[in-house]
Image: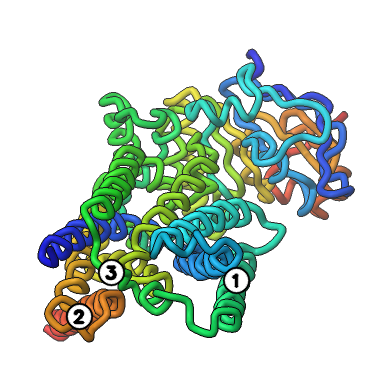
Amino acid sequence: MAALVEIQRLDFAFARQLVLKQVTLTIERGSILGLIGPNGGGKTTLLRLMLARYRPTRGQILIDGLTPQQAVSRGNVLGYLPQNHAIPENFPISVRQVVRLGLAGKTGLLRPCLREDLDFVEWLLEHVGLADLADQPVGVVSGGQRQRMLIARALAARPKLLLLDEPTTGIDRSGQQRFMQFLVDLRRQLDLTVVLVSHDLQTVSALCDRIACLNVTLHYHDVPHRLPEDLAHRMFSCDLEAMGIKPTGP
Amino acid sequence: MFESALANTLLASVALGTACALLSVVVVLRRWAFIGEGIAHAGFGGVGTAWILALLVPAFEKGGQTPLYLTSVAFCLAMAAGIAALSRRERVHADTAIGVFLVASMAWGFVAYGIYGKVRGAMPPGWEAYIIGQMGPMNAAHAMVAVTVCLAVIATLAALARHIVAYCFDPMLAETSGVPGAFIHFLLILLVAMTIVVGIRLTGPLLVTALLILPGATGLLLSRRLARVAAIAVAVGVVGAVSGPLLSHRWRFIPEGPAIVLTLVLQFALAYTASAAARFAQRRLVAAGQEE
């Protein structure tokens, strides 16, 4: 598989504190990468660097051959679901309108949305199970519905790369399982590449093709079942089998 | 002649009421009421500067209200640019920065007022009218400037509606999906500043933000549909903006600016009561349904 994202010798520092050091990582097209690591390990920072919210101190990121700034300004390369995102509940727009807002960057200033893009929004609403709520104000949707609405918004412009930051936080276990199945279906149907930041090793191991373990530097990048047990212990103080990962010998 | 001045004022009021009402939806949704206050109060600092200029350059005073107004316009626009830049950064919290600008402008205006009074032995001419928005009858040129500025504001809002709504809904999400957030942010604050500059002539700098808050707040009480909220806001804004000149024309002792604000507040109070009554009735209906 060809790489969609290439991160080369990336350093990033807040003030003088190094948050990411010499991170080199490639993400293949069509894959799901689980980005794991302890709190403060730099997972969300790496996502924000990919979203051009921050500029690298050193090194580079290329997404489909573009810098993060170029990728973001195209409006149809990246989709993003932030962690625990509070939406303004009294905002006077409907669920459908929120999803359509995802087209704003792709369409550009002073141009109307294309019919096919609007049709795709309808398909997304149907697919995420919000077609019946499409005309309801955003304030009426539940936590799980809100996540699906924001995912549909992130996918409205048909991005190549979907970045999810702790997407199942605050959702109960059965809701998490439905969400993960929904993500697998989406990946297959839309040929998406997904980066999933999560603390939940079980979820990540069940869902992801590869795991990147990040704690300032990249400690591991391979398939989930090869994750060294001592690394998991050091980072998460957990037993891999208890987390649903069957470790194989060296 | 007076009737023609009233017609000019009413024309400007309708334009201003519409533009401010549309912007007020943005101001309320983005919680920018304090930014509006900051820009509007800068006008008082601008007038203070005009008084000091009048002392230094006596010819400045011979232009009547126009130099006073133009100096406050320049101050407001400069202040808007400063606030727009500061509110994009996190080093100083936006509210703090606006608060500093606001009190500094007001303080400078009062100091300049004191200096002018001390040197000339009289209050600056027209300052009361400036503060409460009764700067004399509008001529056709004033009205045309107001209408042009307001049409530009309305056209910009209509043309960029999708990007503006995306930015107001969530600036960070909008920017990560390709909306030029910095451009929209500066543009919106510039539009707010332009309407304030036009509105100062009608309501005065202390009250102009009423036109940028109350119509949107009233619309949001009555609907959760953006198009409907905007339509209600425009109706409320236009009724408020024309009521001031009409009431002031009928009863000369009533100043235009306060009359506009009180009409807007009255509409807001009615909407609040109606919305509370509707919620109460709905709860009663639900309770009755459960009992059955």
Residue A190, how many percent across, how many down? 44, 25
Circle 3 SS class? loop
Q: Residue type at mark 3?
A: Gly
Q: Is residue B127 left or right of residue A232?
A: left
Q: Residue type at mark 1?
A: Gly
Q: Residue at 51% across / 37% down in the picture?
A: B180
Give the chain of mark 1: B
Q: Are marks 1 and 2 in contact (CB under 8 Å)?
A: no
Which of the numbered marks, if any, corresponds to residue B136? 3
Please tell me whether residue B243 is drawn above or below residue B159 in the rendered image: below
Q: Which residue is mark 1?
A: B99
Q: Residue type at mark 2?
A: Leu
Q: Residue at 40% across / 53% down in the picture?
A: B194
Please tell me whether residue B189 is drawn above or below residue A89 in the rendered image: above
Q: Is residue A5 left or right of residue B48?
A: right
Closer to us: A53 or A36: A53
N-terminal of the pair, mark 2 or mark 3, is 3
Residues flagged by tags 2 and 3 on a common chain: yes
Q: Is residue B189 left or right of residue B107?
A: left
Is residue A96 visible in this depiction of the protein? no
CA separation in Å, label 1 and label 2: 31 Å
Label 1 crowd bin: few (<14), some (14–19), many (20+), radius 10 Å? some
Closer to us: A118 or A27: A118
